[in-house]
Image (cartoon, rainbow, N blue to C red):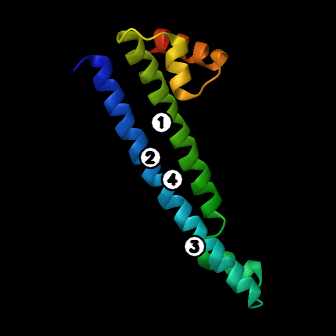
Amino acid sequence: MSIRSERFVRDMATLLQTTEEVFAALERYRASSLELAARVERGAKLQDIYPVIEGPARPREVTEVLVKFEAARHQVRLSMFELGREQGLTMSEVGRQLGLSRQLASVLAREARTSRA
């Protein structure tokens, strides 16, 4: 397996792990949101509920894990452009496979060539 193939596989594994983290964070967010709504429905005040269910922490957690996910997805895209180039694909072909505009494909292909050489 080539270095670019290995990098792609490693980057994809990171993305998949991060996807699991997103699912877990969203499930925690969902559970705390359901609890918040149920308590408000029963007449509780927000100031009393939030400290108990860690309400404010959940949006921050979701934001942080989504930023991490986007970074991992970006690395996979760069790896795909590198691997595609190694396998004889054009920038347009890789971009089309990813469903990207020509402009974004061009930016990613250039970034893959310069930053990960």
Question: Is the C-beta separation of discs 2 and 1 under 8 Å?
Answer: yes
Question: Is the C-beta separation of discs 4 and 2 under 8 Å?
Answer: yes
Q: Nearer the viewer, residue 28 or 46?
A: 28
- In terms of secondary structure, where does tag 2 sit? helix
Measured in 3D between alpha carbons, the distance from the residue under mark 3 to the one under mark 1, in whole angstroms, is 26 Å
Q: Which residue is mark 2?
A: 18
Q: Which mark is residue 22?
A: 4
Q: Amino acid at mark 2?
A: Thr
Question: Is the C-beta separation of discs 4 and 1 under 8 Å?
Answer: no
Q: Earlier in the sequence, mark 2 or mark 3?
A: 2
Q: Residue at x 65, y 69 (%)?
A: 55
Q: For mark 4, does the 10 Å Cα neighbourhood hold few (<14), some (14 to 19), or many (20 or more) residues?
A: many
Q: Amino acid at mark 4?
A: Val
Q: Residue furthest bottom?
A: 42
Q: Residue at x 67, y 75 (%)?
A: 50
Q: Which residue is mark 3?
A: 31
Question: Is the C-beta separation of discs 2 and 3 under 8 Å?
Answer: no
Dividing the picture into quadrants, the one containing residue 4 is top left
Dividing the picture into quadrants, the one containing residue 2 is top left
Q: Earlier in the sequence, mark 2 or mark 1?
A: 2
